[in-house]
């Protein structure tokens, strides 16, 4: 599938999201439409750096200039043109490499944070690291449920969800790669699920980086 690189924007009021599906997983937010678009152009470069640092080949994207990407409104069903159609073999492999890289970055970020800091909210309006991690886990489970009926067994750690994603995507049947159906009133395709999983992982890696920085900034000087 060859499509012109574009940034897709959605939102209202003071919360806007900008997706960059040419680099599946790249997403940014902003308090204005223009702010989200500008942040998405920066996020493209940041996400490439993350992947490159973690050993994922970025040859396909490194010559792209996000400043030249056109801007479009996100379709009303939130399925982007890049989300439609059966997967090519390399796309599944690329997804798994990207998912592995982003999860490694996330685990590296939080691994050595003391338990009391994991639980602490830096400010009244920010999540704690634990709350952010729980959100990542629960949302990934929700995304997986869009591929099939979700089992009753609970998965309560990041790595359990990570292993589950790998297991699910490495045993996909041909019909799974061309999924296009409606679940609870919203349209989902295999490509969209892959894009949203990677976007969500990267979005909250950045989010948790902000929480960690705020924890450091608000920690009493005697314990720094």
Image (tube, grey):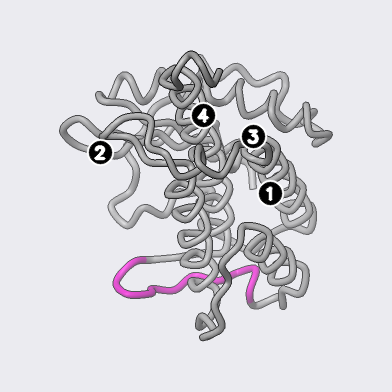
Task: Tell which circle, 3 or 1, labels the residue nearer the N-terminal end.
Answer: 1
Q: How far apart are marks 1 and 4 (CA)?
A: 22 Å
Q: What element carries label 4?
A: helix
Q: Mark 3 points at which residue?
A: 109
| Residue 160 position within the rendered picture, expressed as x and y whole percent measured from the top left | 67, 65
Task: Tell which circle, 1 or 4, labels the residue nearer the N-terminal end.
Answer: 1
Residue drawn at x 72%, y 43% as measured from the top left = 104
Task: Tell which circle, 3 or 2, labels the residue nearer the N-terminal end.
Answer: 2
Which residue is outermost to the left? 13
Q: Name the residue under label 1.
A: 99
Q: How far apart are marks 2 and 1 (CA)?
A: 26 Å
Residue drawn at x 40%, y 33% as measured from the top left = 18
Residue drawn at x 38%, y 23% as measured from the top left = 37
Q: Nearer the viewer, residue 197 or 4?
A: 197
Task: Tell which circle, 2 or 1, labels the residue nearer the N-terminal end.
Answer: 2
Q: Name the residue under label 2.
A: 11
| Magenta residue span | 176-186
Q: Which of 149 and 122 is in front in this view?
A: 122
């Amino acid at each position: 599938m060859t499509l012109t690189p574009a940034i897709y924007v959605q939102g209202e009021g003071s919360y806007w999201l900008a997706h960059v599906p040419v680099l599946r997983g790249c997403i940014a937010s902003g308090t204005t439409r223009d702010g989200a678009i500008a942040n998405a152009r920066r996020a493209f470069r940041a996400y490439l750096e993350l992947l490159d640092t973690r050993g994922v080949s970025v040859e396909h994207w490194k010559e792209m200039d996000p400043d030249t990407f056109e801007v479009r409104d996100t379709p009303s069903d939130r399925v982007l043109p890049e989300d439609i159609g059966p997967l090519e073999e390399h796309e599944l492999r690329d997804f798994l490499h990207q998912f592995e890289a982003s999860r490694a970055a996330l685990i590296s970020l939080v691994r050595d944070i003391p338990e009391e800091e994991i639980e602490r909210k830096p400010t009244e309006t920010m999540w704690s690291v634990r709350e952010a991690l729980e959100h990542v886990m629960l949302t990934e489970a929700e995304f997986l449920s869009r591929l099939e009926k979700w089992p009753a067994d609970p998965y309560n750690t990041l790595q359990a969800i990570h292993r589950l994603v790998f297991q699910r995507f490495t045993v996909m049947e041909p019909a799974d790669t061309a999924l296009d159906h409606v679940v609870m009133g919203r349209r989902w395709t295999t490509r969209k699920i892959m894009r949203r999983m990677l976007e969500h992982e990267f979005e909250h890696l950045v989010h948790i980086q902000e929480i960690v920085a705020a924890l450091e900034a608000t920690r009493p000087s005697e314990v720094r």
